[in-house]
Amino acid sequence: MKYDLLGATNETCPTRYLLARLEGKWKTLILYHLLNGTQRPGELERRIGGVSRQVLTQQLKELEADGLVQKTVFAEVPPRVEYTLSDFGRSLEPVLDQLYALGRHYVQHVRPRPGPDQPYCRKLVPTAEEVLFGPAAG
């Protein structure tokens, strides 16, 4: 497939538009963790690790404004907030899955393996292939 690279500089380029929605250090990780279902901000903060509550909240607001996640606020004291993927956010699952696969390949074949203080991230959601044929070795 050939791509119109000249269009990539245009503000109306679909790739550029989508990448702008995903721009931010934590957004793809947030989306990836939400593939497992609805989560509260504290759960996301613990699972992602290294992100401050303030930054996480800002990234979630942006993802919500861009239509990738849905926020539910419960009328309770103290208030409870949960986030889930929208249909648009869920449509990114194959892309996020491919990013995981590419990252795994890169870490295994290009970069040296991390030491015990830097464990690999654990894949949270099985691919369709893994569901049908079992997990891949390695």
Image (cartoon, grey):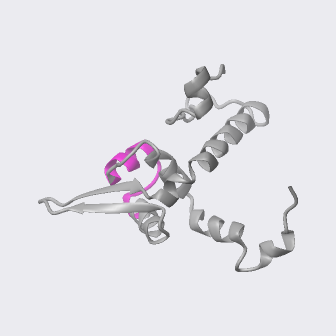
Percent position (x, y) of residue 30? 48, 52
| Residue in view at x 34 percent, y 49 percent | 39
Q: Is residue 48 magenta?
A: yes
Q: x%, y% of residue 10?
A: 76, 79
The part of the image, by quadrant, that contains residue 22 is: bottom right
Q: Residue furthest left?
A: 77
With 120 as the anchor, is 71 left or right in this view? left
Nearer to me, 115 or 51: 51
Image position of 108 (left or right of 41): right
**Which residue corresponds to the image point at 39% horizontal and 50% vertical from the top-left?**
45
Q: From the viewer's side, name the closer residue of 24 and 12.
A: 12
Q: Is residue 3 left or right of residue 30?
A: right
- Quadrant containing the C terminus is top right
Q: Is residue 123 above or below residue 31?
A: above
Count of numbered circles on the image: 0
Q: Position of residue 102 (x, y in %)?
A: 71, 41
Instruction: Kindly indicate the quadrant of the structure image that contains residue 132.
Output: top right
> Is 133 located above or below residue 78 in the figure?
above
- On screen, residue 136 above or below 25: above
- Name the residue nearer the viewer: 32 or 42: 32
Residue depicted at 78% across the width and 72% down the height: 8
Dominant SS of magenta comes to helix
For the record, the magenta segment spans 41-54
The quadrant of the rendering that contains the N terminus is: bottom right
The location of residue 26, given as percent across then percent down, is: 52, 56
Residue at the image position 43 percent from the left and 60 percent from the top: 69
